[in-house]
Image (spheres, coloured by chain):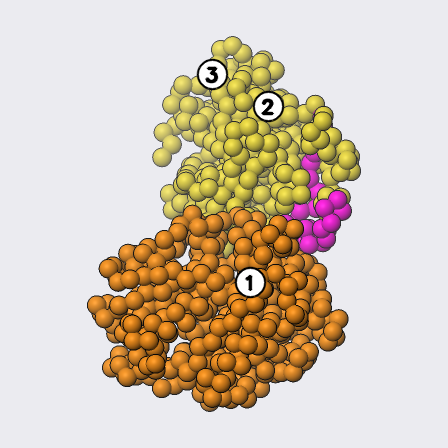
Chain colours: A yellow, B orange
């Protein structure tokens, strides 16, 4: 049980404007585009600009979250950035973000890494600190400019994006109260990147049943048990989305109506934003959810683990949504410019001589 | 020479068995085979295990003793047999010879391979060792490429089509869907095969046997003792093996496996039968073209007519000859070293009349055909009810 109410007081997202189509990647590697689109459920993915990285995406999403919340950045007591593409191996992304949003120096900050679920791990840490009274507000961000080895199946999905969540402890400020969280963690080597390696390795089909599905379903069903709820009690489900197929397949296996999953499924049009993926999915749902609706979010990080959250949207969301003038997820998705594989290679610094 | 019978058989569930290791699968198959013939264990005096590449795939060698140890059978002598994809069939032949010669009185023959713990490219490389490393693999010829060359030549010489090859995969999936131990439990359509991606043209994904984990075990005894242990012993009436050049370019033909033809001739002589007498056959369909060549080389169809016969349904369950009732390598799965023993397990079930859901009617004579590499080893067994 959570000892003191905690909830989301503001949130924001960010997706780079460049896109590359699955057809274009398939063209270069001699693959059939329809097979990719059908097999992975992916049509296009976001591509960061040459000067965009996890830090810049995190900052932009954090600024949006701040504006949405109306909170004074100086009152933020903690900043956590979860990513598997932190620009520096040693030197935190979180301090860059804290400085850029004007939250320094009266706060704690740290970087997190747990493959694609480090962003939701940050939310849990902020929940604990806020509930205990250690902080008034905590900022948790999932941000990535993910890597995929040229020619690997990952190249069709690995994209860039971020979402930020400002977690607080005053009910009157919540746009959604986080009622419960449950995590499911094991040592499962499905996907990894060694120190110094440019691209991750993965276990192919092993990333499915024993990794994604076991953990996503384990966490979701664990949360159902912990809260004594069932699928019918929720209006939306947001699952980690490494491709367009897995979240719908997980829903099917758990008897969840796919129509409750689709509103939070963005991978088919922006790719897998890794640490940003389930947080971005949630942002898309919060942009349309009505007061009183319940949302269940389950992230997944290879290695492997899942964090599940049960939340209830409050009345405040209407006023905050109305007042917010920044970009919503839908604005980022609509603002796009296609690049070809050559430009993509330049942006992603895949040419060794660059 | 003493007559030899199979008294007990068992296999593990074939598939992507991520939660089970080499030992687990061997124990699963072994305990089923031993229970199948009510053995206690102390009667067993010899073990032969066929496995192709555990050193490359899971870093484990010394498989003979490992199997004796994990099955609680030490200090029984245990020997690993390796002949690439024919390791299981050659292990069975080793067990047969051990009983026939009088050296042993109760032999456990196992076949096992643990493949899915290893990345696909490393599996391809390990399997490539079944060909000529210096002349084929080193030059980039993986197994799909070698069989693709054979398929192209078969198409050129005999007019075999991609649809005819696809029919083999469709038939084998139809059979494996009826086999609870099979890797694939689903039927497929011709369209699925034809629309699948090329692995090495003209071979598509669904023309290729999968990478599978699994184990199979058979218990062998002298025929005169066999009745004491089981109601229906199955006699091995012929065991024949032949070799050929490892490299495809050193062979006399690209559309026939000479090793299969030679071993088949010997097997028919030993058994005193002709191809017409065979009711069911488990052939080595690592690729669909391999099944087409096998049913020709084994004499069931004229050279060049295997593709047509497959497309016309002449190899389906209860047709002219029931080929690969287990689902074959394509449908049942291909844990390389286990395949040759699994073929014998299927034939025993069919001859006993116990092949649930896929039983061939009036099944009196069964044959197994296990190939190593692209045809450098071929091992054939013929079985009948004792």
Name the residue located 73 percent from the left edge and 71 percent from the top edge: B155
Front one among B384 and A35: B384
Kindly identify which numbered label has been placed on residue A87: 2
Name the residue located 63 percent from the left edge and 73 percent from the top edge: B256
According to the picture, the residue beneath numbered tag 1 turns out to be B373
For label 3, count other residues whose C-alpha is less than 10 Å away and answer few (under 14), some (14-19) or many (20+).
some
Task: Provide the chain ID for the residue under circle 3.
Answer: A
| Between marks 1 and 2 in the image, the one whose residue lies nearer the viewer | 1
Q: Which percent across, then down, holds residue A292?
A: 52, 39
**Which stretch appears magenta?**
A27-50
Name the residue located 60 percent from the left edge and 77 percent from the top edge: B297
* Cα distance between the residues tagged 1 and 3: 62 Å
Task: Indicate yes or no whether the magenta region holds residue A28.
Answer: yes
Kindly identify which numbered label has been placed on residue A108: 3
Tell me whether marks 3 and 2 sit on the same chain: yes
- Which corner quadrant of the image does residue B250 belong to? bottom right
- Which corner quadrant of the image does residue A15 belong to? top right
Task: Indicate yes or no whether the magenta region holds residue B196.
Answer: no
């Amino acid at each position: 049980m959570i000892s003191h109410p905690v909830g989301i007081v503001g949130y924001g997202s960010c997706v780079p404007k460049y896109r590359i189509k699955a057809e274009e990647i398939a063209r270069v590697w001699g693959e059939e585009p329809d097979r990719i689109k059908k097999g992975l459920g992916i049509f296009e993915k976001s591509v960061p600009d040459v000067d965009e990285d996890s830090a810049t995406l995190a900052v932009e999403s954090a600024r949006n979250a701040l504006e949405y919340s109306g909170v004074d950045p100086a009152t933020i007591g903690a900043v956590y950035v979860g990513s598997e593409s932190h620009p520096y191996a040693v030197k935190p992304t979180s301090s860059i973000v804290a400085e850029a949003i004007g939250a320094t120096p009266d706060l704690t900050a740290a970087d997190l890494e747990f493959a694609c679920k480090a962003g939701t791990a940050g939310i849990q840490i902020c929940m604990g600190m806020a509930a205990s009274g250690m902080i008034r507000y905590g900022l948790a961000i999932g941000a990535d400019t993910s890597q995929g080895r040229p020619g690997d199946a990952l190249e069709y999905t690995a994209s860039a994006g971020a979402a930020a969540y400002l977690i607080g402890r005053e009910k009157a400020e919540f746009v959604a109260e986080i009622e419960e969280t449950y995590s499911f963690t094991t040592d499962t080597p499905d996907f990894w990147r060694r120190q110094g390696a440019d691209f991750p390795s993965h276990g192919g089909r092993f990333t499915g049943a024993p990794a994604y599905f076991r953990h996503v379903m384990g966490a979701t069903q664990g949360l159902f048990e912990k809260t004594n709820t069932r699928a019918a009690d929720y209006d939306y489900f947001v699952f980690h989305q490494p491709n367009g197929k897995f979240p719908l397949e997980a829903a099917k296996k758990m008897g969840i109506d796919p129509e409750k999953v689709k509103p939070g499924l963005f991978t088919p049009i922006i790719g897998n934003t890794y640490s940003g993926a389930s947080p971005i999915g949630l942002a898309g749902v919060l942009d349309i959810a009505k007061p009183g609706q319940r949302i269940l979010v389950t992230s997944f990080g290879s290695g492997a683990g899942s964090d599940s959250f049960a939340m209830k949207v409050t009345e405040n969301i209407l006023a905050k949504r109305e007042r917010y003038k920044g970009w919503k997820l839908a604005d980022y998705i609509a603002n796009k410019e296609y690049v070809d594989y050559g430009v993509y290679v330049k942006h992603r610094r895949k040419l060794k001589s660059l | 020479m003493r007559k030899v019978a199979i008294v007990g058989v068992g296999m593990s569930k074939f598939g992507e068995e991520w939660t089970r290791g080499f030992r687990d699968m061997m124990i699963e198959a072994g305990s089923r085979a031993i229970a199948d013939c009510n053995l206690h264990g102390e009667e067993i005096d010899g073990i032969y295990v066929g496995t192709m590449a555990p050193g490359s795939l899971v870093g484990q060698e010394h498989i003979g003793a490992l199997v004796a140890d994990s099955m609680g059978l030490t200090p029984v002598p245990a020997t690993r047999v390796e002949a690439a994809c024919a390791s299981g069939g050659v292990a069975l032949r080793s067990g047969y010879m051990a009983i026939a010669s009088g050296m042993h009185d109760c032999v456990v023959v196992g076949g096992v391979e643990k493949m899915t713990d290893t990345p696909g490219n490393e599996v391809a490389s390990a399997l490539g060792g079944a060909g000529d490393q210096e002349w084929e693999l080193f030059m980039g010829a993986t197994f799909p490429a070698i069989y693709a060359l054979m398929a192209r030549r078969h198409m050129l010489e005999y007019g075999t089509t991609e649809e005819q090859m696809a029919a083999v995969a469709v038939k084998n999936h139809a059979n494996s869907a009826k086999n609870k131990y099979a890797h694939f439990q689903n039927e497929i359509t011709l369209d699925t095969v034809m629309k699948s991606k090329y692995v090495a043209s003209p071979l598509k994904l669904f023309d290729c046997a999968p990478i599978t984990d699994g184990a199979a075990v058979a218990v062998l005894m002298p025929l005169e003792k066999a009745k004491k242990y089981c109601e229906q012993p199955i006699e091995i009436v012929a065991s024949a093996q032949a070799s050929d050049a490892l490299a495809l370019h050193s062979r006399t033909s690209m559309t026939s496996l000479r090793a299969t033809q030679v071993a088949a001739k010997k097997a028919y002589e030993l058994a005193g039968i002709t191809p017409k007498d065979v009711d069911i056959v488990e052939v080595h369909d690592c690729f669909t073209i391999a099944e087409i060549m096998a049913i020709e080389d084994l004499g069931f169809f004229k050279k060049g007519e295997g593709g047509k016969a497959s497309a016309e349904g002449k190899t389906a369950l209860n047709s002219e000859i029931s080929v690969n009732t287990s689902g074959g390598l394509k449908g049942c799965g291909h844990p390389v070293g286990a395949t040759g023993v699994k073929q014998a397990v299927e034939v025993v079930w069919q001859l006993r009349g116990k092949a649930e859901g896929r039983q061939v009617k009036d099944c009196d004579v069964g044959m197994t055909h296990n190939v190593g590499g692209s045809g450098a080893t071929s091992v054939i067994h013929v079985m009948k009810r004792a």
